Image: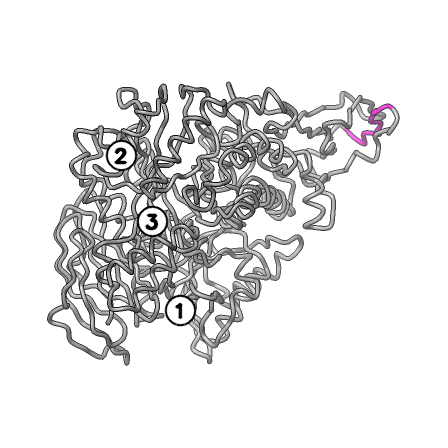
């Protein structure tokens, strides 16, 4: 039976990455424990293999054999870097690539197609700038003209690169669109300046000047991206089409976003803005730098949302269009995809992953960095009903911080936040010249002995966690509109560090961290624009995410701190509250609409939900349908936990008080999924403390314990059943050693 199961799983690999979830269907079969103990190959880690030297057939075969036999890796993700020889995309390079593919094919390993040389993606190894210089990334530039006197003003304003030219009164903030005053024949602007209080602002699109080498493509322009793909994707398809869908199943793009230029823009921006909002954007351009009065917030939301839409419909969509043609799947990420400020990194992390098959988060730079934002990516997967969320993990962690324990710490934390496919960062072709540590390969004296068991752990956990639906009763609003409204170009507060600067009251990642690490009540981020759509259904006192597989039901919404919210979204939240739903807001209540001219309505609805004196005297609000609402001015884990328990006392999972950890490293967290009728609980202790605590699981069930470290299964002992707040709970004892994890699975 076991041979038949493994054979079936391997066959599914050949059919493509969608089968990750399909192989998991064996969980409704008595043999799933055997498949857990000896998982199919597709669940094993597939590391980046940085090609940083002279490739030879013999060395390629040797290293791939070592990766397979000594580390139990499932193939490699080929990542050429600057000193790859033969040169990337040359005939010699493709000859060596065939050796890689044939070696993988013989072992039934996977090869992930990394789509460029180095990072970010989009340079074609430097060829794009040379062959298509008109299609490299663009930047929005601003030039200001201060008229020396009132009266007739004339200036030459070439239309070739012009996006907008606006006159703005520096005192009243009145604005005038001056495009109408440019003579079509000679490009001369003629305008009568009313007073000396006006300045003229010219906005143009220019070739970006912030890259010292290898300019990437304009990620927002599909025509430019098509040109780039003729240099890369199309050449791989021409050479290796026969390997697509079998040996090569996945394509990876890297750091595609606004890194190194917050003002990345595109020539077709105005056209896209008008398609979305029905008007030209010209008059709103000054809001990207300045306060323009009552329309400031709505203007910034509209402008930055347009750019986010262009990003979503640009590079990520074009990659997925290619992969669909060739029976492949896509994965990749923007820079800083878990940072507090998406505006100058991804645009909007939910929209960014609209077309990507495997949304991916990159755990890099430092252990713990971005931990409070990892669930943004898995929440996007939840919304789009994607069964797999990937991670690029360990990149640029200091070598002295990565021991065998760290391999597990970082991994289990990100898995408890929804990740279930692992790309370690990584192997290096020449291990004597590792420019981005750590080295995770059989070449590593420190880590090599730990890799086989680590790979088994990865495979077992990914086998259990892929597919199914996540159980989370809480929806946390992703405050993208406030993030957009509070952002402006060249802000002195930004300190030129992308992704790190947001409005000072922004607390959504703080709330995320408290929910996962302190309160231990699982949640899902909800995009406000999506919440207003029919994808989220109001069902009595719950909100139902209407997915085929990963459907979810929320009985509590948390609105994190933010000044701006969509009126349509707020109206739906009000309806949820009126139906008996529970709502918590933190730190700063919305008072401005994301839409133009709707601020009064936002203020009115907020008062109806939280009370007219909520900001000065916050008290619990109730209605006749059982709805409850509370504003927490200074949220702490204790205050938030008490408020949540007051509103929804019947948590899905309840831990005893001694579940807290004091270790400087690591956390104790969990995720609960349901697949084919089985409840699957993953408990992860990445700390240096042992955990010994009582656990209550909502519902009555019989449970088995599955150890991902050893593959062993055992009946869970000392299980009892109690009633709490009118709900039946299964009562168990959880003991977890430091840096370890376990699954509990219902029979």
Residue at horizontal 62 percent and vertical 48 percent from the top: 298
Residue found farthest to the right: 185
Q: Secondary structure at mark 2?
A: helix
Q: Measured along the vertical axis of the image, is residue 110 above or below residue 568?
A: above
- Whichever of labels 2 and 1 marks the residue nearer the N terminus, that label is 2
**Residue under the point 34% across and 42% down:** 109
Local SS, label 1? loop
Callout 3 touching callout 2 (CB < 8 Å)? no
Near mark 2 (Cα within 10 A), the count class, few <14, some 14-19 or many ≥20, is some
Task: Give the mark nearer the N terminus: 3 vs 2.
Answer: 3
The magenta segment is: 186-195
Whether residue 485 is visible, yes or no, is no
Q: Which residue is mark 3?
A: 42
Where is 602 relative to 541, above or below?
above
Q: Nearer the viewer, residue 592 or 6?
A: 6
Residue 265 locus on image (x, y percent): 61, 34
């Amino acid at each position: 039976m076991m041979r038949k199961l493994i054979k079936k799983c391997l066959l599914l690999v050949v059919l493509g990455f969608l089968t990750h979830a399909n192989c998991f269907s064996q969980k409704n079969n008595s043999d799933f424990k055997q498949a857990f103990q000896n998982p199919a190959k597709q669940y094993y880690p597939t590391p980046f293999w940085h090609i940083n030297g002279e490739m030879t057939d013999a060395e390629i075969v040797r290293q791939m054999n070592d990766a397979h036999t000594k580390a139990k890796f499932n193939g490699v993700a080929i990542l050429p870097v600057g000193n790859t020889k033969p040169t990337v995309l040359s005939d010699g390079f493709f000859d060596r690539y065939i050796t890689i593919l044939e070696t993988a094919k013989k072992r039934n390993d996977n090869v992930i197609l990394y789509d460029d040389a180095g990072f970010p993606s989009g340079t074609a190894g430097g060829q794009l700038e040379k062959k298509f210089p008109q299609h490299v990334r663009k930047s929005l530039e601003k030039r200001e003209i201060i008229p020396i006197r009132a009266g007739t003003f004339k200036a030459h304003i070439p239309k070739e690169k012009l996006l907008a030219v606006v006159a703005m009164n520096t005192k009243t903030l009145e604005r005038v669109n001056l495009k109408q005053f440019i003579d079509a024949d000679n490009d001369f602007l003629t305008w009568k300046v009313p007073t000396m209080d006006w300045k003229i602002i010219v906005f143009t699109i220019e070739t970006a000047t912030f890259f010292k080498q290898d300019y990437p493509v304009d990620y927002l322009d599909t025509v430019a991206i098509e040109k780039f793909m003729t240099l890369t994707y199309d050449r791989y398809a021409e050479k290796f089409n026969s390997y697509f869908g079998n040996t090569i199943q996945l394509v990876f793009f890297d750091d595609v976003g606004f890194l190194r230029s917050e003002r990345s823009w595109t020539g077709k921006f105005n056209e896209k803005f008008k398609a979305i909002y029905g008007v030209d954007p010209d008059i709103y351009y000054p809001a990207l730098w300045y306060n323009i009065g009552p329309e400031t917030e709505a203007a910034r939301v509209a402008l930055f949302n347009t750019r986010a839409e262009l990003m979503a419909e640009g590079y990520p969509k074009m990659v997925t269009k290619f992969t669909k043609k060739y029976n492949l799947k896509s994965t990749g990420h923007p820079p800083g995809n878990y940072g507090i400020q998406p505006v100058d990194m991804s645009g909007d992390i939910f929209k960014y992953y609209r077309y990507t098959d495997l949304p991916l988060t990159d755990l890099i730079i430092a252990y713990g960095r971005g931990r409070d934002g990892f669930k943004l990516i898995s929440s996007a997967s939840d919304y789009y009903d994607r069964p797999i969320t990937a991670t690029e993990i360990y990149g640029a962690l200091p070598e002295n911080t990565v021991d065998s324990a760290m391999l597990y710490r970082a991994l289990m934390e990100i898995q408890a936040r929804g990740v279930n496919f692992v790309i370690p960062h990584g192997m290096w072709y020449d291990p004597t010249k590792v420019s981005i540590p750590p080295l995770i390969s059989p070449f590593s004296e420190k880590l090599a002995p730990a890799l086989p068991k680590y790979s088994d752990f990865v495979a077992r956990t990914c086998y259990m966690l892929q597919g199914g639906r996540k159980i989370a009763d809480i929806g946390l609003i992703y405050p993208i509109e406030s993030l957009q409204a509070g952002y402006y170009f060249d802000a002195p507060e930004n300190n030129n560090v992308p992704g790190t600067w947001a409005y000072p009251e922004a607390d959504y990642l703080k709330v995320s961290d408290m929910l996962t690490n302190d309160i231990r009540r699982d949640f899902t981020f909800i995009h406000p624009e999506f919440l207003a759509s029919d994808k989220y259904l109001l069902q009595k006192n719950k909100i139902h995410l209407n997915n085929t597989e990963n459907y979810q039901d929320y009985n509590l919404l948390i609105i994190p701190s933010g000044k701006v919210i969509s009126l349509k979204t707020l109206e739906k939240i009000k309806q949820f509250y009126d139906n008996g739903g529970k709502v918590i807001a933190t730190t700063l209540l919305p008072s401005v609409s994301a839409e133009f001219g709707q601020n009064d309505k936002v203020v009115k609805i907020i008062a109806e939900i939280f009370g007219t004196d909520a900001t000065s005297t916050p008290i619990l609000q109730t209605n006749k349908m059982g709805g409850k609402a509370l504003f927490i001015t200074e949220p702490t884990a204790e205050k938030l936990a008490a408020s949540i328990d007051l509103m929804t006392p019947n948590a899905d999972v309840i831990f005893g008080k001694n579940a807290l950890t004091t270790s400087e490293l690591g956390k104790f967290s969990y995720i609960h999924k349901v697949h084919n009728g089985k409840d699957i609980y993953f408990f992860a202790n990445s700390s240096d403390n042992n955990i010994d605590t009582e656990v209550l699981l909502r519902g009555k069930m019989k449970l088995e314990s599955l150890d991902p470290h050893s593959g062993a299964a055992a009946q869970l002992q000392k299980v009892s059943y109690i009633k709490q707040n009118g709900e039946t709970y299964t009562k168990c004892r959880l003991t977890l050693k430091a840096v370890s994890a376990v699954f509990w699975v219902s029979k």
